Image (cartoon, rainbow, N blue to C red):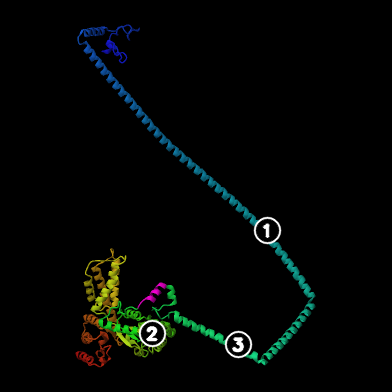
């Protein structure tokens, strides 16, 4: 309405003129589409609308609410204008947003274009680089081909030149050879011609030279004879020269002989002082070579103090007291420079004989030397010399030497009954010669499992006989605890070793093992401790359980029983030979094993007689008996007490034989 009253001409715009439809009021006009000529645009204008508007304006002017209506119209117009402006702003914002989106799209397109261009450039660069590499490779191959071709041509040229030079040299040598042949031939012909022409002169010249040489030799012989004759005559006539010459020759001969023998004596002295005899397997005596090789060990040994003779040695109470007395007596004997006593230690293997010998030497402050009887026989005729070297070496020690001979029965056998070689017999005689008298330089300790095989002269040289029997229950328990602590508890509680111990009563288990290990030696029990340690190391988690310990003990018991079976078979195979010396524990085991397998009547009689013998022998330390297979000739049955020869004359063996004959 504002445009009707003339307000808002600058801001508003007149309403659009009403468009008359195409078919209204123009159908018959001459200027319409149907006519051929144009018409005026105001020809169809209807003024009624303006008239109504003018009338409405007059009515409003006459109305008392004209001002309010005008204000309302203005407000409406302002509202419309504000709405129009807001729409314009929205349109402008939309346009700006479209521009921003367009700019974003353009930037995105530009980025994509740049990315694509970069990819294209990279691809182009890679392709160009590839082409450049190919060109370079082609150039290298071409250059290599050209170099090879040039080298080949050079080689061909050199070969051709070498061939030409070689051909030239060969041709020159051929020509020179031909010329030399011709020259030599001409010279030979000329020389032959000259010799033929001068043959008489040459013969005369040879004759004159021979005569002159003969005359010269004769004159030389005469002159030499005259000179030597005059010199010898003058030397013989001069008594002072003759005496001086004889003395000089005598001194020269004495010097040569003395130097040769002194060298041998000095060598033997140095060997006896600094070396170690070949028969000695182990020794605590310090040598120069050992001191240079192990200086720290040598220093510790020199600073070491005497040890307890029974440290680490488990023996019965009676045997322990006896060997302790021997150790104390040996130590005091060395301190007082007295004569040492020779000792024989016998008993089953693994009962501590070698260990006690080492401890005895360390306790008394002496050096120990260990040799085995089996090393003497392989030496043959050199055994005597080696035996003397051992005793000479032992006699040079300032501290004294405890000479321990292990398995002494291997070469100290009976000379009368045993079939031994002459070399071994000579070595035995040398041993007897060197041990005939007691010495303050060395102490002889023999160890054997079969002392009855010793030569009688050996027994005469023994001052003390000690029987190392198998350990009893108390000793076995001490041994089991000792090796359990050494091989199991020690590694499990100290160090970083892979060994752990399960929870169980260790003391009770050791007592049970000691009861089950009846008849075992100390060495077998120590091997049992090593077996426990090996079982722990072989397990996945390194834990030693009670089941594993019992399993190893069962295996050891079975192995011990198998060894006893082998010992029985060995004794049974020697029909007619000397019986076997066994401790009473072993004898009891063999009797039980044989009694289970016997069934025939003769064998029952043998078992009966054997059992009677065993009942009487169990009260002794050991018994000496043939195997059951030797009892078939029952009259040959005998039982002797080893340490009591008077028991051979006792009446109870005869009574047993009578019982056996009566039962037969």
Q: Main secondary structure of the magenta part?
A: helix
Name the quadrant containing residue 656: bottom left
Whether residue 413 appears in this view of the structure is: yes
Other residues around mark 1 within 10 Å, as few (<14) / some (14–19) / many (≥20): few
The foreground one among 260 and 72 is 72
At a point 28% along the width and 63% down the height, the residue shown is 541
Mark toward the start of the polypeptide (2 vs 1): 1
At a point 35% along the width and 7% down the height, the residue shown is 38
The foreground one among 358 and 40 is 358
Dot 2 and dot 1 residues touching (CB under 8 Å): no
Question: Which-is-in-front pick, marks 1 and 3?
Answer: 3
Quadrant where the image shows the C terminus: bottom left
Name the quadrant containing residue 359: bottom left
| 455 to 122, vertically: above or below | below
The spot of residue 543 in percent (x, y) is: 27, 65
The foreground one among 195 and 573 is 573
Other residues around mark 3 within 10 Å, as few (<14) / some (14–19) / many (≥20): few
Q: Which residue is mark 3?
A: 248
Magenta span contains residue 424: no
The spot of residue 240 in percent (x, y) is: 65, 91
Using residue 170 as the reference point, say whether residue 255 is left or right of it. Answer: left
The spot of residue 484 in percent (x, y) is: 27, 72
Q: Which residue is mark 2?
A: 442
Using residue 212 as the reference point, say whether residue 572 is left or right of it. Answer: left
Q: Which mark is residue 247?
A: none
């Amino acid at each position: 309405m504002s445009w009707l009253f003339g307000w808002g001409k600058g801001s508003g715009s007149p309403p659009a003129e009403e468009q008359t439809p195409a078919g209204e009021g123009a159908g018959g006009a001459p200027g319409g589409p149907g006519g051929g000529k144009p018409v005026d645009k105001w020809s169809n204008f209807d003024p009624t609308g303006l008239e109504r508007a003018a009338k409405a304006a007059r009515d409003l002017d006459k109305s008392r609410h004209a001002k309010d209506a005008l204000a309302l119209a203005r407000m409406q117009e302002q509202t419309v204008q504000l709405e129009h402006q807001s729409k314009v702003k929205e349109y402008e914002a939309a346009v700006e947003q479209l521009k921003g989106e367009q700019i974003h799209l353009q930037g995105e397109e530009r980025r994509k274009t740049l990315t694509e261009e970069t990819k294209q450039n990279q691809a182009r660069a890679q392709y160009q680089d590839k082409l450049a590499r190919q060109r370079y490779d082609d150039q290298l191959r071409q250059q290599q081909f050209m170099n090879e071709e040039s080298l080949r041509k050079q080689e061909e040229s050199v070969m051709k030149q070498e061939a030409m030079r070689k051909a030239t040299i060969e041709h020159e040598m051929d020509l020179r050879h031909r010329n030399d042949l011709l020259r030599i031939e001409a010279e030979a012909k000329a020389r032959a011609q000259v010799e033929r022409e001068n043959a008489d002169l040459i013969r005369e010249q040879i004759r004159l030279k021979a005569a002159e040489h003969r005359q010269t030799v004769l004159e030389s012989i005469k002159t030499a004879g005259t000179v030597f004759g005059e010199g010898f005559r003058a030397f013989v006539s001069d008594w002072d020269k003759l005496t001086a010459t004889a003395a000089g020759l005598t001194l020269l001969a004495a010097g040569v002989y003395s130097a040769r023998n002194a060298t041998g004596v000095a060598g033997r002295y140095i060997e006896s002082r600094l070396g170690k005899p070949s028969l000695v397997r182990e020794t605590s005596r310090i040598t120069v070579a050992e001191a240079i090789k192990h200086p720290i060990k040598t220093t510790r040994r020199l600073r070491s103090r005497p040890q307890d003779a029974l440290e680490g040695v488990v023996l019965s109470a009676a045997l322990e007291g006896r060997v302790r007395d021997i150790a104390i007596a040996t130590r005091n004997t060395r301190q007082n420079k007295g004569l040492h006593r020779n000792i024989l230690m016998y008993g089953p293997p693994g009962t501590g004989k070698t260990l006690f010998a080492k401890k005895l030497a360390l306790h008394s402050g002496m050096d120990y030397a260990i040799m085995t009887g089996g090393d003497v026989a392989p030496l043959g005729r050199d055994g005597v010399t080696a035996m003397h070297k051992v005793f000479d070496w032992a006699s040079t020690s300032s501290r004294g030497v405890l000479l321990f001979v292990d398995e002494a029965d291997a070469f100290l056998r009976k000379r009368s009954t045993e079939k031994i070689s002459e070399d071994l017999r000579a070595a035995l005689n040398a041993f007897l010669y060197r041990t005939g008298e007691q010495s303050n330089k060395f102490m002889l300790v023999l160890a054997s499992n079969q002392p009855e095989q010793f030569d009688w002269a050996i027994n005469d040289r023994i001052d003390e006989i000690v029987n190392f029997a198998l350990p009893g229950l108390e000793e076995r328990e001490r041994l089991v605890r000792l090796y359990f602590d050494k091989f199991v508890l020690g590694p499990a509680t100290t160090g970083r070793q892979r060994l752990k111990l399960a929870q169980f009563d260790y003391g009770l288990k050791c007592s049970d093992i000691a009861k089950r290990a009846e008849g075992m030696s100390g060495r077998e029990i120590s091997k049992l401790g090593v077996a426990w340690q090996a079982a722990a190391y072989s397990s996945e988690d390194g834990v030693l359980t009670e089941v594993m310990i019992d399993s190893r003990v069962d295996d050891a018991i079975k192995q011990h029983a198998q060894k006893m079976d082998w010992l029985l078979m060995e004794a049974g195979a020697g029909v007619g030979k000397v019986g076997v010396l066994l401790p009473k524990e072993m004898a009891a085991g063999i009797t039980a094993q044989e009694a289970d397998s016997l069934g025939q009547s003769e064998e029952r009689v043998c078992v009966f007689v054997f059992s009677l013998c065993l009942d009487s022998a169990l009260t002794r330390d050991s018994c000496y008996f043939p195997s059951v297979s030797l009892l078939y000739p029952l009259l040959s049955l005998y039982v002797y007490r080893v340490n009591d020869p008077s028991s051979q004359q006792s009446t109870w063996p005869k009574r047993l034989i009578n019982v056996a004959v009566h039962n037969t």
